[in-house]
Image: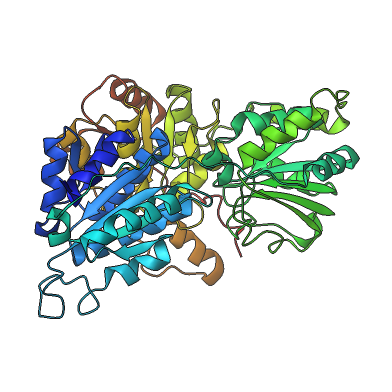
Amino acid sequence: MKTVASLLIDHFKGWGVTHIFGIPGKPIVPILTEIEDNGLEFIVTRHENGAGFAASGYSLIKDTIGVAIGTSGPGGTNLLTSAGQAKAYHLPVLFITGHPSIKDTGKALGQDSSMFGTDLVKMFEPVTLFSARVERKEQFELYFKHAIEKACVGVKGPVHLSIPFEVLVEEINPFNFELPREVPVMSTQLENVIHQLNQAENPILFLGKGVQISKAYEEVKWLAEKWGIPVITTPGGKGTFSTNHSLSLGAFGLGGTERATKYLQSNIDLMIVIGSKLSDMSLAGFKESYKPKKIIQFDIDTTFSGKSISVPTLVIQGDAKRNLEELKKKVNGMESTSLSPINLLAQEQGNEKSQTEELSESSHYISAASAIKELRRHLPDETILFGDDGSHTFFAIKHYNIYEPGTFFFDDVFGTMGHAIGYAIGAKIASPHKPIVCLTGDGCTLMHGTEIATAVNEGIAVIFIVFNNGGLDMVDKGMKQWLNRSVGAKYKEKTNIKKFAESLGAIAYRCRNKSEIEDAIREALEYKTIPSVIEVIVDPNEIPPILNRV
């Protein structure tokens, strides 16, 4: 016989999970002792949201399930936002919360997580794929299997189990449950895809975050090259295709490039959308005249397929990588498709991006666009960058070149400010030998920047790059654009991020020009067991590439 808590840890170990993230509390103590007794690492974050974010970054890079735990009541409610962010990324993260006592439920309890207090099961339902309370030991095995299967199969995402203290310490018969591996479902429409591609005269590939989730980097590259199709990416799709490829036109939507917009004006007859629901963030600036004649939309979740752009849409449901692999098998052996003139046009436009305009600087600050380009010059090609939600990352979407697909991650759907700080920490734990960078802003740092102390405490050498312009820049510039005024988006006192970071134990720099950025990055890359924070003072009046959103 084994306790429920010990069986949880046995399964995590068996699945290759090495680190679990959270903050202690009495109802979850049985899990904490089992973590320590079994040689797993418990990462004590500074906020439960930080635990959820770190578990998500760990899951994303390690390609396994992530685990975040919080105590009952506020410990659970503090995890809700990170669960919503994991859902937007389709990440399999198990959120475990406690409950003080199942036998005393209905009496007055401190931090009650049942229907008589803060019902965490109901609160997690909108932000997870499965949420349930294990009220007796006999339920644990089935509920656990249901949760993990929901997390890992089909449309993946976070799940939640509330397990009361008494249930965690009860003994049950041991069982072994392998981490589910999905059997891919192939679309029956792939021959139709080939036919439409062969008939297209002016197609475009539109790549979204789903390419990141399925890791279909080589497959989309093959598709683009096979038919000579120019490629644009959504904000969340940034990082799915090399920007120095001759077919790359950069991004569209918020942070989009002029090249991508210009090409969409050239009477597109077929748009192949892969891994994007085509949200307002991805279609910012999209006009009626840009509509293609037809769309082929690859997506595992078809909820929004064919609904954002009203043209005939062929939906290819399933994992993008698996369907593109099958598509490649079908065309192998066929006569090679000749490249059309659009490839030459894309190559000409691709060459334009190497012509870097120099933006003016002052002695007080550097332009954000120039800072992004300087970062790219000095960060290794294999650096994995997590972009936080704000103007800083939209500058990167436009100006940060991608040399290796799968090295830039950003969410343009849920959009939690500060989430990239925790994601980068979890990612560095999952991949300790790769440079991991978090690009964030002063507003995001004031929300979740105390997680830098987690990185210090655990010896996690993330490089945090903080663009500081003294306010909530994206909101500020948006309000000025549409209302001719800004309300509540500027701080009366600008935070000294360098001093803040140093107070948490990090190595910190404050940069106002290119040479200072170069020196800071060079030094930060040398540290192996301590995080670095590079504060960049950027132009507070610079207009970010986000004003095309209506």
Q: Nearer the viewer, residue 479 or 271?
A: 271
- Give the left or right position of residue 110, taking residue 226 as reference: left
Residue sitting at 18 percent across and 49 percent down? Answer: 5
Colouring convention used in this rendered image of the protein:
rainbow
Q: How many numbered marks have been drawn onto this rendered protein structure?
A: 0
Percent x, y of residue 163: 22, 60
Residue sitting at 62 percent across and 37 percent down? Answer: 321
Q: Is the residue 162 above or below the residue 257 in the image?
A: below
Q: Nearer the viewer, residue 132 or 417?
A: 132
Q: Quadrant of the C terminus?
A: bottom right
Q: Nearer the viewer, residue 142 or 329?
A: 142
Q: Is residue 541 visible?
A: no
Percent x, y of residue 399: 55, 37
Q: Nearer the viewer, residue 199 or 416?
A: 199
Residue sitting at 20 percent across and 65 percent down? Answer: 74
Quadrant of res 427: top left
- Give the left or right position of residue 365, taking residue 119 as reference: right
Residue sitting at 80 percent across and 29 percent down? Answer: 331
Quadrant of res 169: bottom left
Q: Is residue 62 visible?
A: yes
Q: Is the residue 332 above or below the residue 112 in the image?
A: above
Quadrant of res 204: top right
Percent x, y of residue 352: 69, 30
Percent x, y of residue 238: 56, 40
